[in-house]
Each structure stands twice: as C-alpha cells, then as structure tokens.
Image (spheres, helix red, strand yellow):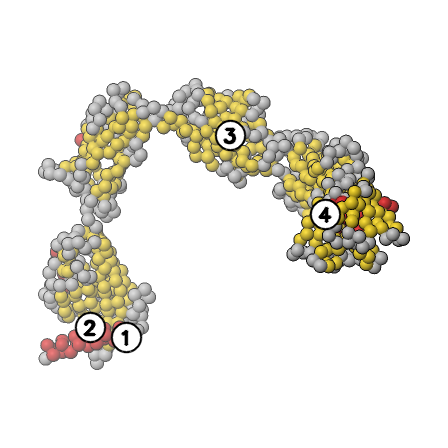
C-alpha cells in the first residue's frame, strides 16, 4: 500500500511540474517569489570530490498552512556536473536537511520527513506546521559530517547553483502551488597565484634606490597554505636589499616576519602562518618605500631582476611557480614635460593687469618629471611665453606632494621669459598659477609656453586660451575716392562674456585720409552695459565711446549712421577701423584689440553696372536707377538703350548728344568720342570706323543696340548670365 501511494504521489508531483511549465502558478517566478524567502551561503571549492559547500534555505513567506496546504514538498537539485558524495536515505536525511521545529530551532530532518533522493537531489516533506508567528523553514546542507558534501566533475568552473522547489499539496493530493529559486552554494575556482610587478623604475647606482613593487595575488582563499614559505631572490649580481623589505598582506592572512633575513642580503623570505580565510589573499613586497629599497653598486648595469617562488613545509614546490621579474633598470636620469592640466582657461587680450590662467577654479599646470632618479639640483629651467608677458609673479613651483617651494623666479626678455634653479632632492616639479599679461594686439588662440634650460626638460605646452574681450563685425559697401558724405556699414561690437569690456573708454580710429562726416550713433542693443558716445572727445578721425560701468549681462554695442569723407591722402582698398581701450586707471593697455572693415575705397571711375532682360531697372555700384525703356532680346542678342549704358559707365548726361536730322548719337567721355547712326552697322571711335554685325535701332524714342558694342567702346568688360538673364559691365 505504501509503495502504491508513493508511486501515486510521484506521478502527481511529475504532473504538477508539467502543469507548471504550461500554466503560471501564483508566485512561481524566480525573481518575485510568493511562498518562500530564499537564502544561502557559498564557499570557494575545487573541481574535485568530497567538497564542502555552503547551504540553501527556504523560509515561509506566505503562511503555508494558510494556503490550504496539508503537506509541503521541498526538493533541492544540484546542477549538471555536481553530485552528492553519497546519496541520502531515510536514516541519513538529517545530515542533508534541517527543518525548523516548533521552538524556532533548525534541527535535523527525521525519517518521517524523508521522501526521496538521488545522486543530485533530495526531497523532503513537511506535514505539520509551526503555530503562531514562528516561521517554518527548510535548510539544505552540503557539509554536515562529510555526508552531504559534493563531488565536482573535472572541468567544471564557476557558480554551483542549487535549485530549491517547494510545492503545496492539500489533503486530497491536489497541487495548490509550486515555486522555485536558485541559490549559489559554491564557486568552483582553481587555486592559482599570479605574480606581477609594477613598471620597472629607471634608477642610477646608489645605496637606497627604489624599485617596482611585487604583488602576489591568490585566485581564491587558502591557495597559499599554512607553512608555505615565499622567497624573493635578487638575480642581478652585487645588488642587495638595503633593509628587510616591507611586506603588506590582507587582513585575514599572516606571515612569520621573525624569519626575515637581516639587511644586506640578496634573499628575502617569509612563511605563511595564517592562510586567507574567505576572500583571496594578496601580498605586496614594497620596494619603493623605506625600508625595502635596494643597494645598487656602480658595477651594475641594465635590468635588475628578482625571482619569486614558494616551498611547502615538506620542501616540495608550493603554489608559486618560479617567476622572474624586472623591478628596475640602471640608466641615466631624464626629465620630461608632462601632465598638462586645465588648459581650457581663458585670458583676455588688452587688459593691463596680469591674469591667472584658470579653467573654472583650477589653475593651469604641468609637471617636470624625472625618470631614473631626481632632477639634478642647481640646473636652470627656462619658461618662455610664446605670446604675452609674465606678471610680477610668473608662476608657482610645487613638489610632488603639492607643497609650494620657496624659489626665486626671475624674468627677462621683456618679461616674456622666466627662469629658476632646480632644488635638490626632487623627482618631480609642478608649475602652476601662471600669471600673464596679454597685449590687445595679440591674436586669439592657444596660450603656449616653451620649456628649455639645463635641467634636461624641453618642449611646448598649451596652458590656456587667448581670447578677445569683444568681437567686431560690419558690412563693407564701396565708397569712392575723393567722395564726401558716403555711407559706410554699421559696426557691431559684441562682448565675449559679461564684464569683459572694462569701464573706461573705447576708441574707434579711422585710417589716414578718411574722416567722419558728422557723428555716428552709438546704441546698446543687447545686455546692460552702460555705454554712450563721448561728444566732447569724438572728432573727425576718432569716435570715442564712454563705458561708464561694466555689464552684468554680455552686451552688444551698435554704431550706425556712419558716413565718410575720403581725401587725397587716403589709399584705395579697405577702410579698416582700429578699436582699442583706455581709461584713467589704465585697466586697458591702449593697444589695438580689433580691426574691422566697414567700407572699401574704389576709384571714382570704377563702376559695376547690371542690366536685366525685360526690366527697366539697372544698378550702378549697387545703387538702383530707372530707365524709360526695358532691355529686350532680338535674334539672340540683348538690346540696351545706349543713353543709359553711357550713364552707367560714367558719361555725363550733358555729353550724350542726339542729332535728330541725321539720327546720330554722339558720346563724349574724356578724350574719346563715339558715334552711332540708326540703321548703320558702323561705329566710329575717335573717327575710326568699326563694323558691327547689327545696326542700332530706334524703339520708343531710344537708340537700342546690343550691349557689348557700346560697353567695349567705353572701355568696360562685359558678361552675360543666361540663368538670371543679366548683363554685367565692369569699368576699372
């Protein structure tokens, strides 16, 4: 009868698991459980037999009896490759499973709790439940009396996850719910040790020379066993330990330092007296601090090497295979410029006072770093600014710990260069807090210093940026030589950031031969800078703007209504306006900060005329004029009115003559006389006949002729744009 019932229950459990694959039970998800709280612990183990692991436990979360369950079945299953060292049975189940009793204590399961077991699983049942607030709990063990230890297949590595499944069944045998969770009970990690060294240090011979530290790292706890001795053997002849080195190790390890050899030997060793317990252990041989440095006589050249290995207490090889490491190299000291930081700091051109190069609150810095020893004392370091000058305190020099060194820093080369002598005993110097003055005429761009001198360091370093306190833009229309009252472009001054235009005065100075016709308008069009035109100081050559107070918001100043008179001393080309600052407290340095072109002087005879097919509007040097007839096309040729072409190319209206009797047009310009007759294809230039392939015609009372003949006769070059149907004539 018992066998039949057990077989029936096995079928029922199997069916329940199949149903669980098809229909989601309440709380059956791994990450969000309903009926149980799952916990456990793991240990690091080997891929071997008879391994002690942690445990996996499920504790009642939702009252099991409250769900209507009469029996709780709990099964733990080990993953593939993992089996119990021995299969549980009814008599040994208490060595595999603990169950919480009515007093809340976990006690060994009894034969009454045993249901089934295999090489990789155990199933127990719970038929009575604890009353009140005492939670029921089932704990699966993997270590008690070595009965429940596990065997790990060769080649297995990683986490050993035990799966716990609990099932609630009512008194009729109906499965009410099923839930499962995986718990890590062991981590299979091979026992190994890695031995590494920091980057080798370049050193010179001497009595107390630092070398690279050597680190021994376990892959898991207890890799290095109690009684195992770790040896550090200097391989390079004549090199010795200056003192017994310092050995750092993790807190749960210990070594027998009483066995350390005395100073002046080539062999250092320690014995493990307490192995690492839970976490992998680490030992570090400190060769870069006192005690622990090396004695390196002058006979030594090249690499300095140390071999690390270990032996067990019985003399057999330990876990550390013989490993030879290079910890130092004997060579010359070199000094390099390195570690530039905070190179985004900005200084502004045109300020008379010195500025500290910063990015945010951090001052720009770089280092002079020695390799192979200390920087030689009494050597000269020269720092040259590629643009600008140093302030009264050019920069600060600090040691590697950030302490400011008391050094005399001198300037020369009109304060563009500074120099100091290197102090003794320093392997690294940091230069920071650069104080610079940047003249207004310095171009914007990188702020660069060049390092040189006898200390061995050389190179260029970007320590910041040079910017202008404001930018200037303008249009640049053409104006004519010897012209009066000619409109120029507006000038717009845009502040780089709030407060960058200092209080005082801004000057806009015109080039020689160009003067203002009247006084331009000055207006703040954005921001809150207090700026206005200074009428008492503005003259025909210079516009003066008073800046009564700096801005709190980046501002824009617009100068408009600018008109120029151009005298004989002016040069053709750009009218470049120079802008600079000055004030009573000399905050500006008075040098030109910016230039802007807001007009171009051209010859009085220079003309560019544009006519458009079908339009009675034409332009000369950008100014529009109106004709009483429109250009038209005939036989693939563009006909223009001769009179307006002559006007456009500088012929005075009084010198455009019409003889109605002979229907002849005469144009007079300078020493040239041009004649055209309606219906005749002969053009006369200063009496010389030139044959045209068409004849001029009269349309709406105007003499019309293809544009090329009359333009070329007046000395202009011509072009035609088919896409826009425009004729362009240029007269220099």
Q: Is residue 353 left or right of residue 53?
A: right
**Where residue 22 is drawn, which disc sits there?**
1
Q: Is residue 398 left or right of residue 88?
A: right
Secondary structure type for disc 3: strand
Q: Position of residue 249 (x, y in %)?
A: 26, 38
**Where residue 729 is drawn, which disc sits there?**
4
Q: Nearer the viewer, mark 1 or mark 4?
A: 4
Image height of 258 relative to 620, above or below:
above
Q: At 75% across and 58% down in the image, what residue appears?
A: 632
Location of the N terminus by quadrant is bottom left
> What's the distance in space between the residues labelled 3 and 4, CA to CA?
54 Å
> Which residue position holds label 3?
449
Q: Is residue 66 left or right of residue 588?
A: left
> What's the distance in space between the residues labelled 3 and 2, CA to CA?
85 Å
Q: At 22% across and 39% down in the image, what residue appears?
A: 254
How crowded is the residue under tag 2: few (<14 C-alpha within 10 Å), some, or many (20+)?
few
Residues under numbered marks 3 and 2 in contact, where contact means CB atoms less than 8 Å apart:
no
Q: Is residue 293 visible?
A: no
How crowded is the residue under tag 1: few (<14 C-alpha within 10 Å), some, or many (20+)?
few
> Which numbered disc flags the more N-terminal residue, 1 or 2?
1
> Which residue position holds label 2?
127
How crowded is the residue under tag 4: few (<14 C-alpha within 10 Å), some, or many (20+)?
many
Q: Nearer the viewer, mark 3 or mark 2?
A: 3
Q: Nearer the viewer, mark 1 or mark 2?
A: 1
Q: Nearer the viewer, mark 1 or mark 3?
A: 3
> Which numbered disc flags the more N-terminal residue, 3 or 4?
3
> What's the distance in space between the residues labelled 1 and 2, CA to CA?
27 Å
Pick the front one: 216 or 595: 595
Pick the front one: 315 or 532: 532
Secondary structure type for disc 4: strand
């Amino acid at each position: 009868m018992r066998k039949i019932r057990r077989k029936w229950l096995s079928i029922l459990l199997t069916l329940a698991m199949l149903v669980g694959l098809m229909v989601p039970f309440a709380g059956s998800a791994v990450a969000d459980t309903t009926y149980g709280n799952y916990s456990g612990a793991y240990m690091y183990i080997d891929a071997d037999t008879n391994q002690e692991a942690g445990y996996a436990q499920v504790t009642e979360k939702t009252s099991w009896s409250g769900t209507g369950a009469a029996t709780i079945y709990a099964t733990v299953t080990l993953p593939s490759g993992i089996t119990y060292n021995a299969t549980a049975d009814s008599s040994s189940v208490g060595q595999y499973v603990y169950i919480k009793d009515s007093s809340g204590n976990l006690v060994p399961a009894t034969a009454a709790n045993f249901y089934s077991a295999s090489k990789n699983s155990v199933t127990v049942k719970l038929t009575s439940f604890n009353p009140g607030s005492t939670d029921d709990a089932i704990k699966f063990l993997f270590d008690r009396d070595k009965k429940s230890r596990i065997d790990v297949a060769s080649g297995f590595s990683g986490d050993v996850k035990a799966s716990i499944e609990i099932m609630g069944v009512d008194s009729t045998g109906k499965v009410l719910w099923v839930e499962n969770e995986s718990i890590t009970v062991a981590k299979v990690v091979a026992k190994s040790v890695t031995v590494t060294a920091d980057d080798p240090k370049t050193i010179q011979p001497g009595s107390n020379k630092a070398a690279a530290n050597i680190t021994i790292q376990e892959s898991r706890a207890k890799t290095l066993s109690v009684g195992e001795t770790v040896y550090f053997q200097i391989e390079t002849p004549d090199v010795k330990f200056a003192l017994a080195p310092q050995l750092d190790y993790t807190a749960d390890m210990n070594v027998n330092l009483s066995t350390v050899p005395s100073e002046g030997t080539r062999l250092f060793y320690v014995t493990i007296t307490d192995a690492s317990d839970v976490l992998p252990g680490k030992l570090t041989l400190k060769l870069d601090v006192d005690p622990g440095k090396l004695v390196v006589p002058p006979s030594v050249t090249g690499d300095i090497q140390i071999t690390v290995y270990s032996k067990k207490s019985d003399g057999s090889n330990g876990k550390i295979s013989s490993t030879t490491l290079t910890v130092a190299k004997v060579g010359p000291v070199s000094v390099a410029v390195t570690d530039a930081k905070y190179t985004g700091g900005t200084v502004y051109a045109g300020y008379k006072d010195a500025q500290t190069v910063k990015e945010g609150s951090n001052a720009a810095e770089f280092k002079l770093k020695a390799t192979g020893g200390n920087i030689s004392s009494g050597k000269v370091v020269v720092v040259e600014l590629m643009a600008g000058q140093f302030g009264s305190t050019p920069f600060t020099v600090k040691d590697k710990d950030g302490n400011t060194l008391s050094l005399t820093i001198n300037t020369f080369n009109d304060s563009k260069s500074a120099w100091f002598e290197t102090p003794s005993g320093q392997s690294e110097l940091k230069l920071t807090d650069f104080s610079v003055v940047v003249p207004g005429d310095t171009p914007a761009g990188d702020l660069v210093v060049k390092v040189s001198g006898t200390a061995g360091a050389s190179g260029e370093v970007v320590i910041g940026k040079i910017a202008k306190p404001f930018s200037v833009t303008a249009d640049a229309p053409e104006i004519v030589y010897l012209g009066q009252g000619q409109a120029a472009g507006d000038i717009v001054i845009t502040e780089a950031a709030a407060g960058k235009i200092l209080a005082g005065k801004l000057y806009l100075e015109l080039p020689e031969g160009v003067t203002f016709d009247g006084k331009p308008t000055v207006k703040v069009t954005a921001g809150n800078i207090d700026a206005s035109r200074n009428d008492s100081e503005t003259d025909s050559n210079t516009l003066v703007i008073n800046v009564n107070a700096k801005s709190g918001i980046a501002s824009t100043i617009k100068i408009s209504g600018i008109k120029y008179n151009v005298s004989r001393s002016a040069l053709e080309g750009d009218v470049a306006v120079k802008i600079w600052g000055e004030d009573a407290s000399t905050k500006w340095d008075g040098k030109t900060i910016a230039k802007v072109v807001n007009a171009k002087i051209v010859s009085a005879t220079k003309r560019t005329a544009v006519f458009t097919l079908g339009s009675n509007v034409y332009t000369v040097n950008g100014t529009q004029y109106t004709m009483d007839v429109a250009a038209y096309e005939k036989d693939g040729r563009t006909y223009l009115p001769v009179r307006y072409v002559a006007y456009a190319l500088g012929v005075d209206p009084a010198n455009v003559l019409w003889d109605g009797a002979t229907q002849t047009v005469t144009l007079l310009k300078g020493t040239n006389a041009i004649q055209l007759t309606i219906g005749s294809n002969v053009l006369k230039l200063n009496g010389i006949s030139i044959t045209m392939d068409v004849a001029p015609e009269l349309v709406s009372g105007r003499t019309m002729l293809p544009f090329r003949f009359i333009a070329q006769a007046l000395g202009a070059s011509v072009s035609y744009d088919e896409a826009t149907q425009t004729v362009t004539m240029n007269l220099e």
